[in-house]
Amino acid sequence: MKLSTFVMLAAGAAGLIGSTAALADQDLATQRIAYSDLNIATDAGVEHLYARLRKAAEQVCGTPGIKELKAYARASACSARALDAAVAQVNSPKLTARHQLGSAAARVAAL
């Protein structure tokens, strides 16, 4: 099975990603992330792709300063949703496992 060579990361202008119908009504920021240069069957390839996806999610959702609490919370939620969607789009068990590990660590750190 040949995997796609790119992922399209999308985030709503308001920092919210919802249903397909809701997406049609919003202006979307998108970014294409290429990964044809990576072997995502390896741990190193997965780590590189995951780093690209996280960076892209932050770029499309924004990264306000921590002192801007509401904007920071919206951007963080937007980044998390965009990253969830991008990982699902790649449809790689190794990438999904890596994402679940990162999500679990973030929840523990928030405690």
Image (cartoon, helix red, strand yellow):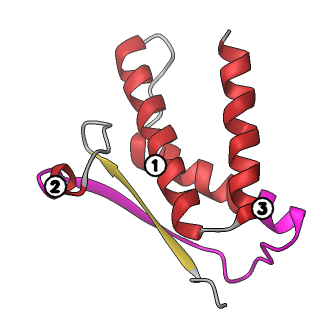
Q: Indicate left or right for 13 with 41 as reference.
A: left
- Residue that label 1 marks: 82
Q: Decide: few, some or many residues near mark 1? Use Cα within 10 Å; few <14, some 14-19, many ≥20.
A: many
Question: Quick check: 66 left or right of 68?
Answer: right
Q: Is residue 97 above or below residue 100?
A: below
Please report whichever mark, 1 or 2, sits nearer to the chain's N-terminal start: 2
Query: Which secondary structure lies at badge 1?
Result: helix
Q: What residue is disc 2 on?
A: 21
14, 20: nearer the viewer? 20
Work out which quarter of the rendered image holds the C terminus and state it: top right
Q: CA distance from mark 1 to mark 3?
A: 18 Å
Q: Secondary structure at mark 2?
A: helix
Give the magenta range: 24-47
Q: Where is mark 3, residue-wise?
A: 94
Three-letter amino acid code of the residue under disc 3: Lys
Direction bottom: furthest residue: 2
Q: Amino acid at mark 1?
A: Ala
Q: Position of residue 63 (x, y in %)?
A: 48, 33
